[in-house]
Amino acid sequence: MRPHLGPSLGATTLSALLLVTATALACGGASDDASAMDGGTGGDGDGGDGSGSGSGDADGGSGVSGENLYLGVCSSCHGVEAEGTPLGYELRHPPREHAQWVVRNGRPGDEFEGSQMLAYSPEAISDADLQAIFDYLDAFEVPTEGPELYLDYCGNCHGPDAAGGVVGVDIRDKEFNDILEKVRQGIGLGNPGGRTTYMPQWDAATLDDAQVQRIADAIPTL
């Protein structure tokens, strides 16, 4: 189920959403101005040139709802309901450490032809607004079936068929216990910029053992 729409934007929020115009090319095309792209480093980029006109200062929020911020800044590439498009990943239930690193450092877009994501500094999207977007994305209903759980939590990195995807790690032959260990412990924590050497961790409150089992059972069927 999609979270309910918030109230219509009023005059008090229009200035914050001027960011939409400044960031319309976030995913839609390559730019030499984007810096610190996802290249396996530890996230020491300066946030690139995606400064826009600002959605508030670096410490405070704009007052715009997470849904409206998402629709204005992210949906053109990632879909109106964060379902993913040919220009960008599905974004429901994002692992926040990695998601925040990508927003702040950008991504070259090798996985999506003609779609590069610029970096956004805290002056463009404040930390508070970014957390509001993440809260909105976390509010989507969690799938119940294995294939959908896999696509939600694993597919962006390991590919829709679990054959390796952008990280090049084939997990089709992995057993439940191995998958569960990686899910609980993660890999390369603290270095979310290391795309091929980093995996977020999920605790049982977020992804319980039964859900991980359904993912493991689904992988051979993908």
Image: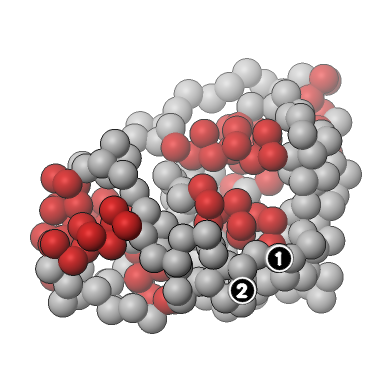
- Identify the residue at image location x=68%, y=71%: 37
Q: Tell me the quadrant of the picture where the C terminus can be found.
A: bottom left
Judge left or right: residue 40 versus residue 178: right
Judge left or right: residue 78 versus residue 152: right
Residue 151 in sight from this viewpoint: no
- Identify the residue at image location x=34%, y=35%: 141
User: Is residue 35 positioned above or below 9 on the image?
Assistant: below
Secondary structure of the residue carrying numbered label 2:
loop
Q: In front: 185, or 127?
A: 185
- Identify the residue at image location x=84%, y=61%: 49
Tag 1–tag 2 contact (CB < 8 Å): yes
Judge left or right: residue 35 versus residue 148: right
Please provide percent x and percent y for residue 3.
45, 28
Dot 2 amino acid type: Thr
Q: In front: 10, or 97?
A: 97
Dot 1 amino acid type: Asp
| Quarter residue 125 falls in | top right
User: Is residue 87 positioned above or below 41 on the image?
Assistant: above
Secondary structure of the residue carrying numbered label 1:
loop
Model colouring: secondary structure
| Pointer 2 local density, CA inside 10 Å: few below 14, some 14–19, many at least 20 | some
Residue 46 in sight from this viewpoint: yes
Q: Tell me the quadrant of the picture where the N terminus can be found.
A: top left
Please provide percent x and percent y for residue 178.
18, 66
| Quarter residue 101 falls in | bottom right
Residue at the disc numbered 1? 44
User: Is residue 122 positioned above or below 90 on the image?
Assistant: above
Q: In front: 173, or 141?
A: 173
Residue at the disc numbered 2? 41
